[in-house]
Image (cartoon, helix red, strand yellow):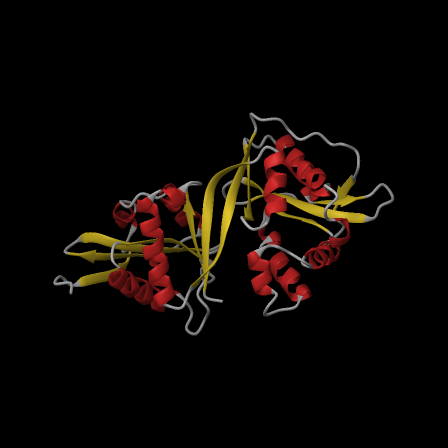
Amino acid sequence: MHEVHLKVRPLSGREDLDLFRSIPYELNEELEGDLEAGRRRLDWLWVAQRANRLVGRIGWWGRTADDPPLVLDILDVSDADDGVRLVKTAMRAVLPAGSTPPDYVRFLPPDWASDPALVHDVDLRRAVLERLGARPLVERLRLEWDAAGPVPEPNGRLRFRAVADRAELVGLMISVLEGTLDAHSRLELTRMTPAEQANSQYEDELAGYNSPREWWRVATLPDGTPVGFVIPARNAYNPIIAYIGVLPAFRGKGYIDDILGEGTRILAAQGAPRIRASTDIANEPMARAFARAGYVTFERQLDMTWS
């Protein structure tokens, strides 16, 4: 039993950022920029202290400061009971009453599973969130193409044109959901139709990118038949392959390499020093395609969900 009272509170001002960042994590360096841009708020960043010693922290991220946060992406605890109190107290204050909490994500080194200290920390965070109703969803590869490497060359099998409009892209997105290996999409399809899922993803994610929509490409056969699509974009941090898909009738023919190559070429032509992407570990065809295109795994991502 702890003898010293646990104090759980949001950050009171920018002067608290050094305290919050005293636990090392790669997202620490983005906090000030995110606060300035409205992707975070001080009252979304909480700490737990005993006798002024930091024993835990939690933080959410969102696209705007005016809407509820979209993801829980910072969580560090040193004790399971304290962690439960921290998360429960902060969630009650930050999240709309009765809402499903946002997914939790954690970025880790590619070889994290071979490091006992990291495994312990992952297990501790997972235990805390499971006690509050979350469950593990997926482990993902975080991938990066570096401009120092070769740019994939087109082989001429496919033609590429700009996406005509929202209706065309949403229609293609609906089609690629058939047989998808993406864990998030599979989960969403248990509670909504493919059309609802595609429209939601378009509105909540793709429509929010400020990069030119002229970059978005539909891949076709020489006769104009659509084969798939790729959405090169730029988020608040990096150029990215935001979405890529091959229509079910054309899978297994290697077209994913052509389509990913086109997305990579578009961003490389804009002078991107690097391109980021991600895919589920279980989506082996997509992971192999990224590897063939010169993308390397620089991190892994663990996701948990309350859905």
Q: Residue furthest left?
A: 3
Q: Is residue 115 left or right of residue 282?
A: left
Q: Is residue 101 left or right of residue 258?
A: left
In the image, 149 versus 64, the foreground residue is 149
Q: Residue 4: percent from the left, percent from the top? A: 13, 61
Numbered-mark total: 0
Q: Residue 233: percent from the left, percent from the top? A: 61, 43
Name the residue at 19% across, 62% down.
Answer: 6
Q: Quadrant of the N terminus?
A: bottom left
Q: Does residue 16 appear in this view? A: yes
Q: Is residue 261 left or right of residue 136?
A: right
Q: Residue 260: percent from the left, percent from the top? A: 66, 40
Identify the image quadrant of residue 190.
bottom right
Name the residue at 67% across, 31% down.
Answer: 152
Q: Residue 75: percent from the left, percent from the top? A: 35, 54
Name the residue at 42% across, 40% down.
Answer: 111
Q: Does residue 42 appear in this view? A: no
Name the residue at 74% across, 54% down.
Answer: 248
193 w.r.t. 286: above or below = below
Identify the image quadrant of residue 77.
bottom left
In the image, 46 versus 182, the foreground residue is 182
Q: Residue furthest right?
A: 223
Q: Residue furthest bottom?
A: 98
239 w.r.t. 57: above or below = above
